[in-house]
Image (cartoon, rainbow, N blue to C red):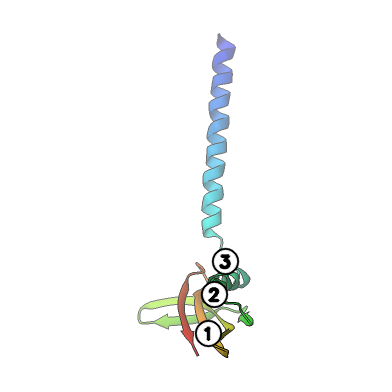
Amino acid sequence: MHRQIQYGGLLAVGMAGVAGGFSIGGLLKRLRRPTPNQILNQVKRAFLKEAPIEGSWIEMKKAPLQKFALRTDVYYGGITRYEDGQLVQYEFLADANTGSILDIYRL
């Protein structure tokens, strides 16, 4: 009977460790910042849903951005594609910390 309690306790500790590992892994994944290439691929996937892309780029160096009280670092990038037979360029701003697209505009 005494051994059953030890194995039960050991099993509980092991399961708690596994659960804690998954929690920490999820937290680390959320804290990891996206790379410029990951952000560019996200934008390209969105544009590819509408039409083929002729070219794309992203600056690898973060740039500071301040708009009113908001201060953050951003990546600038761009997409080129044909629309109605004409080459059209878009630029975008992405938050360097989250990967969120802050603005996309047609040139």
CB contact under 8 Å: marks 2 and 1:
yes
Please, which residue is most extreme toward the left here? 68
Q: How far apart are marks 2 and 1 (CA)?
A: 10 Å
Task: Say if 84 sits above or below 41 in the image.
Answer: below
**In the image, what residue occupies the spot 53% across and 27% down?**
12
Q: Mark 3 points at which residue?
A: 34
Q: Name the residue under label 2.
A: 47
Residue 67 in the image: state x and y as whole percent. Answer: 39, 82
CB contact under 8 Å: marks 3 and 2:
no
Q: Distance between the residues labelled 1 and 3?
A: 21 Å
Q: Distance between the residues labelled 3 and 2?
A: 19 Å
Residue 52 in the image: state x and y as whole percent. Answer: 60, 77
In the rendered image, which quarter is residue 78 located in? bottom right
- The first of marks 3 and 2 along the sequence is 3
Please, which residue is most extreme toward the top here? 1
**Label 1 residue SS:** strand
Say which mark, if any, is on residue 90: 1
Q: Quadrant of the N terminus?
A: top right
Task: Say if 100 sits above or below 78 in the image.
Answer: above
